[in-house]
């Protein structure tokens, strides 16, 4: 399958990757191209910005969560019928698992998917010094795949001279520059960027940026580089008896909490659930007073419940309905913010206690720093997950909150580290804890959940 594609990367976080990725996506969309977008790694918020631009769901590609063949399959599957695919890197180009490897880095994703990389160089405070900076990134690995550079925060006056030096001395194509645009900035909070809906005048800012980039970037050359990427297979990388082929004999209706409090959702998780037999219906723990009719399972993903603690507490009817359904045996999946909401009580961002659903016997409280941050491998220690043993699962944690009741049915192991801890509540009809799951990393989890939902339906 021929998929023109590029990966936008940088030397460090804070170099402007997300803003420029959104700007380039808008430029391509303005040209009438059908664009697929992807985020390297486990990030939830950057794909929301991509989605806001292109109007279709952005996806994650993660070489820790899935192996090489699965990453390539997901890229091909989600780029079908598109003119070009744009991937946004994570952190610095070579930064990976454990802080000492390139595993699960943007560099590894570029190599696994055979994608040309374009290095975004923040030139603030530099001129000639950008040359050794670029040279180091391009030559650190023989297969760096860096096919060009974009000079960010570069002046129009200096750009022609710096471009000439780079192309003559390093033989690396310079694909344009980005001047400093004062009013096109994305702000951050404790879990990363603010949500797209919170950026005042986002569409207007984006269109302004796209107009600038159309003038300052070599868009045709970028598309030419994207077109140089080799074909990629789209065959399914699993055997016929794999859990990936599982499908229920009949549909089950699954209620997924999705609103401003619960918004950290991997789109591929939902699609795999649907492929396995789920009918997804959304509800809002902030606004709705009752659960959707006929649901046989509930999912609470992560998000920002700590920003809406009072609103969640005040919506007593839905908290009561969730607890009543749980007591009747409905299967529930809950991650991070969703897990916090299920507690007897949780703190908001100002450390005010708020009543939760009451399923988890304990209190979720705010800390002053990131707790167990990063990738983990989870191994089931005891008990069952919806009546099954699902074995090992790759997962990810990122939270400033802690709980007096984290659970102990799984052992979490940090890669490239000796650090371990117990986590997760698991039973016949509950899996809840801080870790985030990516279902393509272990399809036995959604399978076990949906089978239990079908039991509940019957």
Image (cartoon, rainbow, N blue to C red):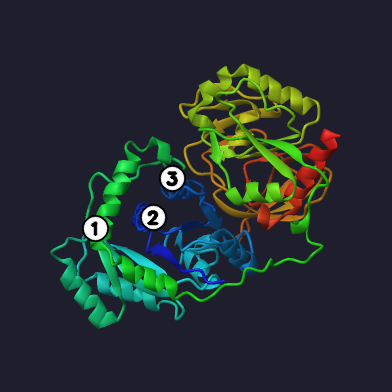
Residue found at x 77% / y 66%: 239
Residue at the disc numbered 2: 29
Q: Secondary structure at mark 1?
A: loop
Q: First in sequence: mark 2 or mark 3?
A: 2
Badge 3: few (under 14), some or many (20 or more) residues near its Cα, within 10 Å? some
Residue at the disc numbered 1: 153
Percent position of residue 88, x then y: 44, 59
Q: Secondary structure at mark 2?
A: helix
On residue 295, the disc is: none
The outermost residue toward the left is 157
Badge 1: few (under 14), some or many (20 or more) residues near its Cα, within 10 Å? some
Residue at the disc numbered 3: 52
Q: Is residue 437 visible?
A: no
Percent position of residue 333, x then y: 70, 39
Q: Is residue 49 visible?
A: yes
Badge 2: few (under 14), some or many (20 or more) residues near its Cα, within 10 Å? some
Q: Nearer the viewer, residue 269 or 132?
A: 269
- The answer to which image quadrant residue 195 occupies is top left
Badges 2 and 3: C-beta atoms under 8 Å apart?
A: no
Q: Nearer the viewer, mark 1 or mark 2?
A: 2
Q: Compute the Cα span from label 2 to label 3.
A: 12 Å
Q: Nearer the viewer, residue 406 or 266?
A: 266
Q: Compute the Cα span from label 1 to label 2.
A: 24 Å
- The answer to which image quadrant residue 80 occupies is bottom right
Say whether residue 174 is left or right of residue 309: left
């Amino acid at each position: 399958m021929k998929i023109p594609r590029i990966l936008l990367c940088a030397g460090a976080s804070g170099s402007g990757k997300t803003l420029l990725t959104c700007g380039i996506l808008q430029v391509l969309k303005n040209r009438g191209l059908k664009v697929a977008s992807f985020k390297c790694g486990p990030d939830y918020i950057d794909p929301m910005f991509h989605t806001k631009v292109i109007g279709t769901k952005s996806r994650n590609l993660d070489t820790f969560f899935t192996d090489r063949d699965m990453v390539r399959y997901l890229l091909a599957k989600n780029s079908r019928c598109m003119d070009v695919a744009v991937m946004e890197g994570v952190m610095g180009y070579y930064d990976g698992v454990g802080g000492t490897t390139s595993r699960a880095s943007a560099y590894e994703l570029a190599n696994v998917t055979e994608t040309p990389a374009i290095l975004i160089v923040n030139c603030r405070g530099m001129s000639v010094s950008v040359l050794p900076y670029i040279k180091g990134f391009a030559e650190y690995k023989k297969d760096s795949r860096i096919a060009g550079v974009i000079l960010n925060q570069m002046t129009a006056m200096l750009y022609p001279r710096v471009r000439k030096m780079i192309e003559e001395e390093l033989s690396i194509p310079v694909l344009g520059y980005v001047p400093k645009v004062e009013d096109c900035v994305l702000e951050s909070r404790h879990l990363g960027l603010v949500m797209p809906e919170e950026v005042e005048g986002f569409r207007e800012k984006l269109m302004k940026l796209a107009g600038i980039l159309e003038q300052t970037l070599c868009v045709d050359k970028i598309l030419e580089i994207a077109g140089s990427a080799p074909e990629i297979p789209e065959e399914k990388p699993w055997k016929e008896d794999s859990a990936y082929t599982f499908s229920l004999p009949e549909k089950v209706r699954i209620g997924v909490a999705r609103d401003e409090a619960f918004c950290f959702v991997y789109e591929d998780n939902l699609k795999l659930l649907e492929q396995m037999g789920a009918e997804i219906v959304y509800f809002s723990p902030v606004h709705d007073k009752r659960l959707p009719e006929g649901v046989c399972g509930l999912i609470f993903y992560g998000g920002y419940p700590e920003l809406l603690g009072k609103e969640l507490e005040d919506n007593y009817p839905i908290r009561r309905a969730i607890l009543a359904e749980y007591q009747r045996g409905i299967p529930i999946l809950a991650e991070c913010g969703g897990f916090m909401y299920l507690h007897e009580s949780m703190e908001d961002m100002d450390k005010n206690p708020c009543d939760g659903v009451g399923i988890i016997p304990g209190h979720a409280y705010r800390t002053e720093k990131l707790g167990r941050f990063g990738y983990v491998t989870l191994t089931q220690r005891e008990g069952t997950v919806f009546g099954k043993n699902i074995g090992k699962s790759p997962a990810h944690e990122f939270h400033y909150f802690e709980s007096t009741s984290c659970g102990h049915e799984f052992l979490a192991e940090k890669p490239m580290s000796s650090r371990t801890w117990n986590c997760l509540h698991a039973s016949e009809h509950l899996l809840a804890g801080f870790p985030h799951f990516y279902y393509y990393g272990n399809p036995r989890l959604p399978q076990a959940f949906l089978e239990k939902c079908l039991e509940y339906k019957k």
